[in-house]
Amino acid sequence: MSPMLSQHVLVLNRLWQAVNVCTARRALTLLFQGHAQAVLNREDGSFQTFNFSEWQHLSSREPHAESVRTISLRLRIPRVILLLVYDHVPKKEVKFTRHNIFERDKNTCQYCGTTCDRKDLNLDHVIPRDRGGPTTWENIVCSCIECNTHKANRTPQEAGMHLIRKPKRPKWRPFVQINFSLHQHDSWKHFVDLAYWNVELGEDLA
Ligand SMILES: [Zn+2]
């Protein structure tokens, strides 16, 4: 397989929100099947969309270094595609990880509201584990060491403590699963920035 085909392509949903990253191979398949359009940044800052045949014309009319070639055609590698259908990118649930719990709780002790370094935060079972409290999104919160020590092996009620918000499984958020250490092509910037703001807003409004 041409290394070009494993390049990363940003996937936008029908609302032009960044939802995923796929390989160029997948992007070209979606384009060919009519499930997506290629998106190109124009110099004036606007965006132009192309269906497969329009993209094919552009690819042969303006040859680009980032292309794949077969005997009969040359195709430029799109950097951004716009999905025309909804179902072709599976939604991923936010993984239940230490990192994502810290993210959800914004590195803030859920009892006293202090924001700390991660190293100064514990993960606390709201209902203690040996009292049947499960290890789930709804029963695990960030807690500072002081609150954790004070609470000890008690329920918040027994310890006279209150959660500043009810712990919940985070909603699936567009783009949040995307590994931000991936090299981000320049043409992604607009959408990634937008995704960032969408994520923050969604969180605040939730
Ligand atoms: Zn605390």
Image: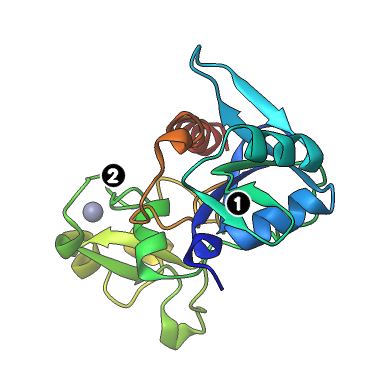
What's the residue type where badge 2 is placed? Answer: Gly
Q: Is residue 72 above or below residue 128?
A: above
- What residue is disc 2 on? 113
Residue at x 42%, y 52% (from the top left corner)? 104
Q: Secondary structure at mark 1?
A: loop
Q: Is residue 32 above or below residue 38?
A: below
178 horizontally vs 46: left or right = left
Image coordinates for residue 27, horizontal then vertical, percent:
66, 54
Q: Secondary structure at mark 2?
A: loop
91 horizontally vs 78: left or right = right
Residue at x 60%, y 47% (from the top left corner)? 19
Ligand 1 lies under 8 Å from the Cβ of mark 2: yes
Proximity of marks 1 and 2: CB atoms separated by less than 8 Å? no
Residue 162 makes an appearance in the image = no
Residue 63 falls in image quadrant: top right
- Quarter placement of the C terminus: top right
125 horizontally vs 69: left or right = left
Residue at x 18%, y 51% (from the top left corner)? 116
- CA gap, disc 1 to disc 2? 22 Å
Ligand 1 lies under 8 Å from the Cβ of mark 1: no
- What residue is disc 1 on? 171
Question: Please, which residue is most extreme toward the top here?
Answer: 44
Quadrant of picture, ligand 1: bottom left
